[in-house]
Image (tube, rainbow, N blue to C red):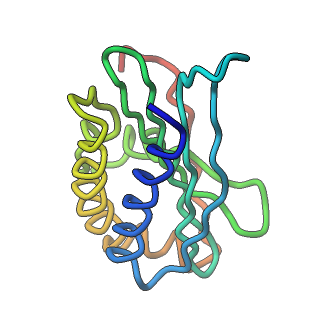
Amino acid sequence: MKKEYFYNLYAKILQELKLQFNCFLIEEVRYRIDENKDGKLFSIDAIYRLKADKKYINLWFGISTWKTKPFDIKIAIKDNCSDYGFPLTDYLSFRPVEFNKGLLFSYLKNYEDAIEISKQLFVELKKLIASEEIQKLLYTDYKVDVPRNWSPYK
């Protein structure tokens, strides 16, 4: 597969993101390509931001070209004016909030499956954003202390 194929795939994900989250300012932060000197593509990532009043939600999508085609999504909440921020998975590890974390990592049968997984994730993320606590996080200067969850066994 060529880089352009993945750029088109991410363009479809971005289009769906804009459709689902039209109340946010959405920024394309960057695309990162991992390839060897011969141009063989190993992975390609895209980072988008959903900007709210005080904070933003960083969405990092990563697709690998390995045989198993892993698709990884990292989500973080960060402050617009400081270095305050935390990964969503760390936040969810100590808060009683329902969220389908299974959508954050998948093995794809076809790369196009990333679009459907992203759509499902956006539905879950909309529910989470609608919660009172996330509203308070995004639209006020409220900052919750989120411990880092470094253990893969929790």
User: For this rendering, which residue is in front, 10 or 24?
Assistant: 10
Q: Residue at x 54, y 39 (%)?
A: 3
Q: How many marks?
A: 0
Q: Position of residue 64 (x, y in %)?
A: 45, 26
Q: Quadrant of residue 114?
A: top left
Q: Quadrant of the C terminus?
A: top left
User: For this rendering, which residue is in front, 142 or 10?
Assistant: 10
User: Is residue 66 left or right of 122 when viewed as pictured?
Assistant: right
Q: Residue at x 46, y 47 (%)?
A: 88
With respect to residue 45, does 140 lie above or below? below
With respect to residue 146, does 136 lie above or below? below
With respect to residue 35, does 135 lie above or below? below
Q: Position of residue 52 (x, y in %)?
A: 56, 77
Q: Quadrant of the N terminus?
A: top left
User: Is residue 95 left or right of 102 when viewed as pictured?
Assistant: right
Q: Residue at x 44, y 34 (%)?
A: 63
Q: Quadrant of residue 37?
A: top right
Q: Position of residue 75 (x, y in %)?
A: 48, 48
User: For this rendering, which residue is in front, 147 or 60?
Assistant: 60
